[in-house]
Every structure is written in C-alpha cells, then in structure tokens.
Image (cartoon, grey):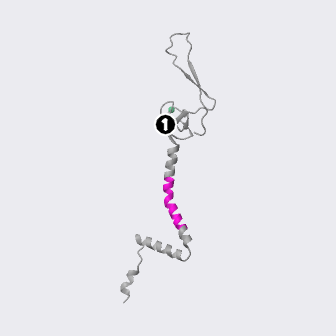
C-alpha cells in the first residue's frame, strides 16, 4: 500500500531545494536557541563572498592613487612607478624619484643643479657666459 509513495519523500539537494534545506536548518537551529550560530555562519559567509570584491576595489583604488605614469625627464622613456618610490630609468640609468606629479631626477638634499644656457651662439669672446643656477627645493615628504 505505502511502498508506492516512498519516492515522494526524497529530498532534492540540488538547486533551490538545497537553499530551502539550508534555510529550514537555519530556522530549526534558531528555534532551539542556536540563532547566534546561524548569525555567525551567515556573517562569515557574507565576509567570504564580499572580501574578494573589497580587495579588488581596494587594490584598484590604491593603485589609482599611487601608480604614477610619466616620462623620464632625461630621455623621455615612458615609465610607471609607485608614488614616493625611487627607481632607475631602464634606458638611461638615471636615478629617479617618483612624485605625484610624475618622475623627477633623484637629487640628494642640497644638490645644486646647474643649467648652462646656450653659449655656442656667442660670437664675442669677451662676452660673459650666462649660467643660471637653480637650487632644487627638498623633496616634499608629504607628496
Ligand atoms: Zn631615462
């Protein structure tokens, strides 16, 4: 008599049935005073599923703030570097300091940079040679 309907009681663990089973178990645990367990499992589950997105967007945000693209001030090679880091140009081997505004030649504090202004066009030997001397401001630590 009853053998015919035995198959109707088989629990389907695939698809939605699985979720309904989980919810039923959660409600059951909650009803017997284990709601805290359900909550902690739910929080862990949410954290695990959200963490990769937070990490992904966090890294993207950090890179957008700290990844600097620019050209070597000496040879114009396109370079990419991290903000406030020091790097060496792969083309001309110049030591470079990465700043928020781009790449600058790395100069220790107190270095005096001398720019020689064009002297080749000078046809009078007694004319004074114009040399501009520029003292670079110290590197801003705050960026
Ligand atoms: Zn270079």
Residue 3 in the image: state x and y as whole percent. Answer: 37, 87
Q: Main secondary structure of the magenta part?
A: helix
85 or 140, which is in the foreground?
140
Residue at the spot 39% in from the left edge and 83% down from the top edge: 6
7 or 136, which is in the foreground?
136
**Number of marks in picture:** 1
Looking at the image, which residue sits at the far right? 110
Q: Name the residue under label 1.
A: 70
As displayed, is residue 126 above or below residue 74?
Answer: above
Inspect this view and state whether residue 14 appears.
no
Asked whether 54 falls inside the magenta stretch, the response is: yes
Locate the N terminus by quadrant: bottom left
Residue at the spot 44% in from the left edge and 70% down from the top edge: 19
Inspect this view and state whether residue 142 appears.
yes
Residue 9 in the image: state x and y as whole percent. Answer: 40, 81
Under circle 1, the secondary element is strand
Locate the C terminus by quadrant: top right
Looking at the image, which residue sits at the far bottom? 1
Category of crowding for the residue at label 1, using alpha-carbon neighbours closer than 10 angstroms: few (below 14), some (14–19), many (at least 20):
some
Residue at the spot 54% in from the left edge and 41% down from the top edge: 83
As displayed, is residue 118 above or below residue 108?
Answer: above
Residue 141 in the image: state x and y as whole percent. Answer: 61, 38
Residue at the spot 54% in from the left edge and 72% down from the top edge: 35
Asked whether 11 falls inside the magenta stretch, the response is: no
Q: Give the range drawn in magenta.
A: 40-56
Q: Is mark 1 within 8 Å of ligand 1?
A: no
């Amino acid at each position: 008599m009853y053998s015919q309907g035995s198959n109707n009681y088989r629990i389907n663990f695939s698809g939605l049935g699985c979720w309904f089973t989980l919810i039923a178990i959660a409600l059951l645990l909650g009803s017997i005073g284990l709601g805290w367990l359900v909550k902690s499992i739910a929080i862990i589950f949410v954290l695990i599923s959200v963490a990769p997105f937070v990490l992904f967007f966090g890294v993207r945000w950090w890179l957008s703030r700290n990844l600097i693209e620019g050209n070597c001030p000496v040879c114009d090679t396109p370079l990419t570097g991290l903000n406030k880091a020091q790097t060496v140009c792969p083309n001309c081997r110049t030591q470079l300091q990465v700043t928020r505004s781009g790449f600058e030649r790395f100069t220790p504090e107190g270095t005096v940079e001398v720019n020689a202004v064009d002297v080749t066009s000078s046809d009078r030997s007694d004319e004074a040679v114009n040399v501009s001397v520029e003292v670079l401001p110290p590197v801003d630590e705050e960026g």
